[in-house]
Amino acid sequence: MEEEALYPIADAEQLINKFLNCTLPKGEFTHEAHLLAGLYLLSKHDDNTLPIIRQHLKKYLKYIGVESTDTSGYHETMTVYWLHQLKKRFADKNGKIHWNQGTVDELIDDEILTERNLWLSHYSKELMMSVEARKKYIEPDIVAVKK
């Protein structure tokens, strides 16, 4: 008997298409939706994902009425951080990320990645919320201790 999907890939792709086409309601673009979009775009564009997701995030934010300023909207360091976390978790030995039901379910079930404040284990709040970190990628100021 086949296991039921945690989040059907068809639903994930519908959500991502709504995001990419700026038709997704603001309340539906959750942390998990951000991660699904990142995972999907990484699987399609690999090392070219950052400029693509940056463009889509800025366009989507404008669509939902969020202006990118020194204190709100698009955040470069946060975007790079989460793309790195996705690559670290899902890239195969050749560095490729595969978009399939298995990876979607793994992402939805991943208690570490779905913790929206995971970045606090690598960044101080002061650095991550700085104008500089919002505008350009900044390296972490906290070294995570491996257990």
Image (cartoon, helix red, strand yellow):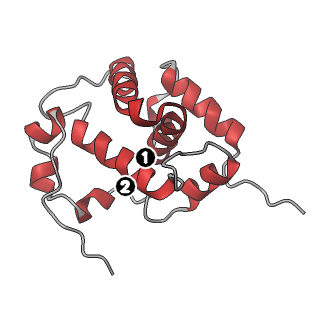
Residue depicted at 9% across the width and 37% down the height:
131
- Under circle 2, the secondary element is loop
Q: Please give the count of numbered marks on the rendered protein.
A: 2
Q: Is residue 119 above or below residue 79?
A: below
Left of 127 or right of it: where is 24?
right
Q: Secondary structure at mark 1?
A: helix
Residue 23, percent across and down? 52, 20
Q: Measured from the top left, where is residue 88 in percent x and y?
A: 42, 56
What residue is pinned by disc 2? 116
**Three-letter code for the amino acid on which mark 2 is drawn:** Arg
Q: Residues within 10 Å of mark 2 (few under 14, many from 20)?
A: some
Do the residues bearing badges 1 and 2 touch, measured as CB atoms within 8 Å? Answer: yes
Nearer-the-camera pick, 17 or 27: 17
Mark 1 lies on residue: 31
Residue lying farthest to the right in this orientation: 1
Q: Earlier in the sequence, mark 1 or mark 2?
A: 1
Looking at numbered disc 1 in the image, what kind of residue is underneath it?
A: His
Image quarter for residue 48?
top left
